[in-house]
Amino acid sequence: EFLLGHYGAGAEVPRKVAIGRNFPGRSALAASLEEIRGGPVSLFVPRWGEYAHLVEVAAKNLRYFVEISELSRARRGELSAVFEELGAALGLGEPPRRLEMVDISNIGPKSMVASLVVFDDGVPDKSSYRRYRIKTVKGQDDLAAVAEVAQRRFSRVKTAVEKKPDLFLVDGGPNQLNAALRKLENAGFGGQAVAAFAKAPD
């Protein structure tokens, strides 16, 4: 399947293809490769030398790829269950696949910054990570900082510059949650799913 997928995707089929000693379905593979190539293809089993080494390396890489793929499928299954539980707990219509989380940090007595991390199907989407320097808030005001980040983030979603999350998580409790909800409702995102999370104490 791997060879047919590789050559069927447009890679040039060579006249000779080295395969492993116990390769199954040799006749069917040769016929399929000949059809793709439009000419004869010879399959051979190298017993020593460079080709034998390449076949051995390819077999090891393929086994590794299969193992990783199986682990990935298992992990996706576990994550799907987590997303379903999270969606049910929050009363969402569907499991949230894209999550954005905002964390507010204080820098000295007068400055604040916010970090936004994004997960897509449980995988960090680092290209979507953002860092905001709070501009409109004087002093330490977490509620106003959360509201500012929500407004700035969704102004880019509104203009289709960035994707809309399935769930927007803010750092804090009910007060921070309500601040984000009010700002999003005023911006036209009243239906956006929002939740608050409190960091565990050190």
Image: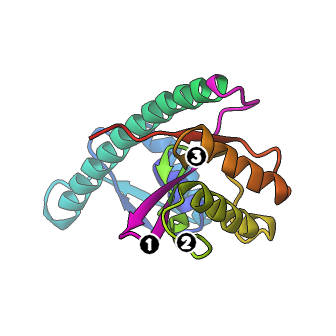
**Mark nearer the viewer, 3 or 1:** 1
| Residue of label 3 | 169
Q: Answer few, some or many: residues within 10 Å of disc 2's Cα (few below 14, many 20 plus, some between 14 and 19).
A: few
Q: Are marks 1 and 2 in contact (CB under 8 Å)?
A: yes
**Which span of residues is magenta-colored?**
89-115
Whether residue 159 appears in magenta in the rendering, the answer is: no
Question: Dot 3, how many residues are within 10 Å of its Cα: few (below 14), some (14-19), or many (20+)?
Answer: many
Please provide percent x and percent y for residue 167: 65, 44
Nearest to the observer: residue 58 or residue 123 = 123
Residue 114: x, y in percent? 49, 64
**Pointer 1: what residue?**
110
Looking at the image, which residue is at 26% across and 43% down? Answer: 21
Q: Is residue 200 above or below residue 85?
A: below
Foreground mark, 2 or 3?
Answer: 2
Disc 3/disc 1 C-alpha distance (Å): 24 Å
On the picture, is 96 further left or further right than 70?
right
Q: In the structure shown, which secondary structural element does the residue marked by tag 3 occupy? A: strand
